Amino acid sequence: MSTPEIQEIQEKRLLGRLLLTTPGAPEVQMHWKTFVTDIIQHLGIKPSEFYAVHEYDAEFSETGVYKTWATILDDVQYSKLKDVSEVVIEKGLYAIFTHHGPTKTFHRTLSYIHNEWLPSSGYVIDERRHFDYMGPKYLGPENPLSEEQIYIPIKKVTPQ
């Protein structure tokens, strides 16, 4: 796994559907499938970019319940979608990692981020939403050639 890019991200306004879940739960894939199918069937549009937005309690846990949204950029063409709400990604500093491979190996990337990179990085997780960007290089959840970007909200460690 490589060193992340550290970047200031501007606020993003998204539209999406909420799911309460645990990491790696099978209902996440069905949640996404339903969301994408609704966009295609009801609007006749096949978006090329999606954002998975995650809100954890105090800290990421591999067993804890958290909020996740299947989202797309807020755009007039999506305003007719049913059962969606606005999701805002706050402006701030993010560490951006790239996950290569299928969803079933995603836990390895998260483990590296939280257990190896973060403790020695000089940063701590900031209490903002995390998100994953799935653009043109995302080839589906099972494809070994898929790539998605993982955005971890961070802030510099302040000396005690």
Image: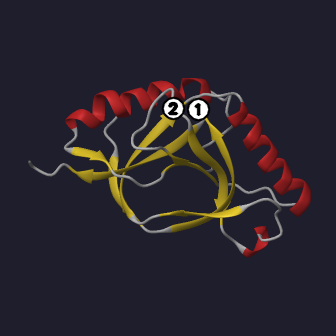
Q: Are marks 1 and 2 in contact (CB under 8 Å)?
A: yes
Query: From the viewer's perspective, is residue 144 above or below residue 21?
Result: above
Q: Nearer the viewer, residue 23 or 96?
A: 23
- Element assignment for label 2: loop
Residue 110: image location, x then y, percent: 44, 31
Residue 85 placement, left or right of 23: right
Residue 153: image location, x then y, percent: 38, 51
Q: Residue at x 60, y 35 (%)?
A: 146
Scheme by which the image is coloured: secondary structure
Q: Residue at x 68, y 36 (%)?
A: 28
Residue 139: image location, x then y, percent: 67, 39
| Residue furthest out toward the left | 160
Residue 100 placement, left or right of 35: left
Q: Nearer the viewer, residue 116 or 3?
A: 116
Q: Label 2 crowding class (10 Å Cα cut-off): few <14, some 14-19, many 20+?
A: few
Residue at numbered disc 2: 64
Residue at numbered disc 1: 22
Q: Amino acid at mark 2?
A: Gly
Residue 152 placement, left or right of 103: left
Residue 106: image location, x then y, percent: 53, 29
